[in-house]
Amino acid sequence: MSVKLHWFLPTSGDGRLIVERFHANRTLGPSAQREPDIDYLAQIARAADQLGFTGMLTPTGTWCEDAWLTTAALIRETRRLKFLVAFRPGVISPTLAAQMAGTYQRISRGRLLLNIVTGGDAVEQQRFGDWHDHDARYARTDEFLSIVRGVWSGKPLDFEGEHLRVAGAAILAPPDPLPEIYFGGSSPAALPVAARHADVYLTWGEPPAQVAEKIAKVRALTEREVRFGIRLHTIARDTSAEAWAEAQKMLDALSPEQVETAQRQLAASESVGQRRMVELHSAGAFAARRPGAVLDRGARGLEIYPGLWAGVGLVRGGAGTALVGSHAEVADLIEEYHSIGIEEFVLSGYPCLEEAYWIGEGVRPELARRGLLAE
């Protein structure tokens, strides 16, 4: 079992600080020092391709560019890099999604991976016309993926479920190869769906013991072979002191008001995974009353496990932790996650372009020396 490293495409913008204030909501003010224009995104994609990353996650949501269209525009900019396209099954027909995947695989010559995002924020789901509640969304995702895989079989499909119905669903030709499905979710409604459909179960960056518990829960629900991946930010430098100084710089750029505004919004999320992220840095009644007070701890005060920093999640929804340290220290923690069953690491940093080189030229060779990298 070896490690695969993926990178991230910042389609809501990029910068040297934590620019995503609740998924880069522009109504809260400027969120990015570098706009996500196609030339800059192509620069990051080419860098990830040249540095040897396996794939590149492209997010979905209101405050970023569409993942399908953006990555399709980057296919000809890269040679071997795969695109992990995030999308929400509640806002697209399953037959259309199956067709799009087939077209994408043929255009890219097999470089599509799919990240299924069921959605944990009712406000955003309703923005796109989805009024299902949390558990119903996961039940619909179950049906959605059953239809997609059925259509990919190459035979016309009839399906009638509680949420979705198709008759004679078919497409020109199935994708070849079939794109792997990456799926995340921490709730009781999510885990059985992951067990039935995921090729790779994704979790956000909790401490190793909590991640191991999730892995055990998914494995207990299925006899299928499921791989496991983790979504993390990184701050890797030549020395530990340099890395933690960079983390402190990011923390110093935040105000208590920014933190408190973001935490109020994040607290309203229906996502169990998001609540688990928030809990990593909000322990204690005082922090619960005044979320901005966590800034007083300093960067090291938000180190929730050796080398695992919760500072990103103060103002960013979704993945809220970072691996921080020297190249060897970051590799150590990657190796520790690998020892409990994590094979795929979906990484990012601020800015994504420069941090790709810190990981690609610093951490990746260290992992190779340890015999951990996939060929």
Image (cartoon, helix red, strand yellow):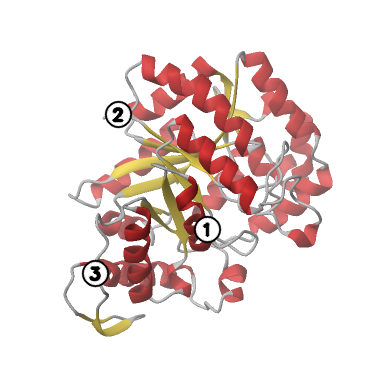
Residue depicted at 67% across the width and 21% down the height = 244
Q: Please name whichever residue, 52 or 218, is drawn nearer the observer in this view of the structure.
A: 52
Residue reaching furthest to the bottom:
167
Instruction: Kindly identify which residue carries mark 3.
Output: 173
Q: Which mark is residue 375?
A: 2
The disc placed on residue 230 is none
Residue 271's tag is 1
Q: In the image, which is nearer the foreground, mark 1 or mark 2?
A: 2
CB within 8 Å, label 1 to label 2: no
Q: Residue at x 71, y 59 (%)?
A: 25
On the image, the x and y values in percent for residue 186 come to: 43, 52
Q: Nearer the viewer, residue 10 or 125?
A: 10
Q: Amino acid at mark 3?
A: Ala
Q: Place residue 96 in its image quadrant.
A: bottom left
The percent coordinates of residue 30 (x first, y second) are: 80, 53
Please tell me how crowded label 3 is: few (under 14), some (14-19), or many (20+) other residues with Cα within 10 Å.
some
Q: What secondary structure is marked by label 3?
A: loop
